Image: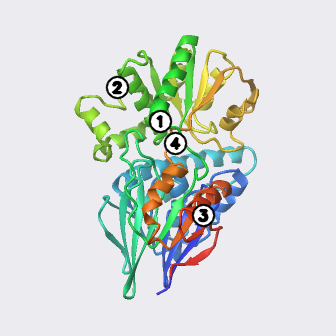
Amino acid sequence: MKIELQFLGAARHVTGTKHLLRLGDTRVLLDCGMVQGPRRIADEQNRNLPIAGRDVDALVLSHAHIDHCGALPRLVKDGFDGVIWCTDATADMLRMMLMDSAHIQGQDARHMQKRGHPVEPLYDAEDVERTLRLVKSVPYHQQFQVTPELRVEFLDAGHILGAAIVVMDVEAGPRRRRIVFTGDHGRKNLPILRDPERIPECDALITESTYGDRLHEQRGDMMAELARIVAEELHDGGRVIVPAFSVGRTQSVVLFLGQLMRDGTLPKLPIWVDSPMSREATRIMGKHPDLFDDETQALLKAGHNPLFFDGVTYVSDVEASKALNQERRGVIISASGMCESGRVLHHLKQSVGRREDCVLLVGYQAHGTLGRRLLDGERVVNIYGEPYEVRCKVRSMYGFSAHADWRELLDAADHLVTRCKQVFVVHGEDQPAEAYATRLRNHGFRQVVVPSKRDIVEIP
Ligand SMILES: [Zn+2]
């Protein structure tokens, strides 16, 4: 039986992850992510998936970020009716992420309709329900049979709650091949989550490379930096707006602020998490304390909830969100992380013009986004089509990233060098992917490939 891999998304890109494992006539898709980016290109690619749903026999999902799961309902709409395998926590996250995605698309479609450009949403809530009915969730560390020739096990990737390193054992005649997909590889010492598990020995590795050319700040430095920025704001009498993704980043910022207030580094100050989805994500995290790291478990045992404590308010309804305009002191954490949409825009409208306020960017800011324009120091930005002069301070911190940097990736792969015959570097723009591939080669890995979209390789 021929074993092949085909890269159908996130090849020389960071979004739209789709890798196809071809085992003879059987097709197993790893992730089915949504392509994000300029609307016209993304929409075309998400609408016309690179593989027909009926041609996929089973799907293995690494985690619930939308660039890994967001095109699943489209695949189902397109005829996929196999099993979707994922971890228990990912299954919980999946409902929230896909329902939110369907909701956004519905809104978008109505908006376009008004402007005279009728578009069909990629999928709706009903398609999401059909998708969720196909999900079979399994705990970490439990092997399961995906097809007669393929057994899979999930290990903790330490990236977001439920995220997995996917270990695939293929029975090909008398010999067994092991292929490992890192999914999105997390980092040691991220708040709340356990550290990424050790990648097991394998014949082939599919590795992410988001930050393949970059080093992050370490946790101790980040705490000090966050304390410094917030203390400066308190001194200036302003407020801090933190645009953050609902899953992962928001909870990290809340936990860090809680810790800084508990140990007296920062005075007690109000924190608002203004995003219904952040609230839901935080609730789901609370359902899985068994997946927390030792530090967080100890905190819980000592009676400190790191995500719900005195001073944090989770804002759901719109009126309460609007009322935050009156608040001149404290921290507002709100989505979206790149300031492209969501409630954070309303807070930015209030704050960008005020010298005493600060926008703190804690995540990746893609080209062309409002977050990037603020980061680049543009003096005038458009929010909802209106120009606003930027007088506030803009700060950024990269240490909150839930993706390993190049050194962390290389450390995680280091012990594989003798046995692993092929490494495929995916989920990175050209430059970081190539930079990381070069490092792997210099490190002694024999065949290191940065595949392009649709490339097919054989696992001998
Ligand atoms: Zn991710």
The residue indicated by pointer 3 is: 9
The reply to whether residue 327 is in sight is: no
Q: Secondary structure at mark 1?
A: helix
Q: State the separation of the CA atoms marked 3 and 2.
A: 41 Å
Amino acid type of the residue that numbered disc 1 sits on in the rendered structure: Thr
Q: Nearer the viewer, residue 75 or 437?
A: 437
The residue indicated by pointer 1 is: 250
Pointer 2 with pointer 1, Cβ within 8 A: no
Q: Position of residue 44 (x, y in %)?
A: 69, 60
As drawn, is 47 to the left or to the right of 444? right
Amino acid type of the residue that numbered disc 4 sits on in the rendered structure: Ser
Q: Residues within 10 Å of mark 4 (few under 14, many from 20)?
A: many
Q: Nearer the viewer, mark 3 or mark 4?
A: 4
Q: Secondary structure at mark 2?
A: loop
Q: State the separation of the CA atoms marked 2 and 4.
A: 24 Å
The residue indicated by pointer 4 is: 401
Q: State the separation of the CA atoms marked 1 and 3.
A: 27 Å
Residue at the (58%, 53%) spot, across then down:
212
Q: Nearer the viewer, mark 2 or mark 4?
A: 4
Say if 21 sits above or below 254 in the image: below
Amino acid type of the residue that numbered disc 3 sits on in the rendered structure: Gly
Q: Is mark 1 within 8 Å of ligand 1?
A: no
Amino acid type of the residue that numbered disc 2 sits on in the rendered structure: Phe
The residue indicated by pointer 2 is: 309
Q: Earlier in the sequence, mark 1 or mark 3?
A: 3
Q: Secondary structure at mark 3?
A: strand
Q: Residues within 10 Å of mark 1 (few under 14, many from 20)?
A: many
Q: Earlier in the sequence, mark 2 or mark 4?
A: 2
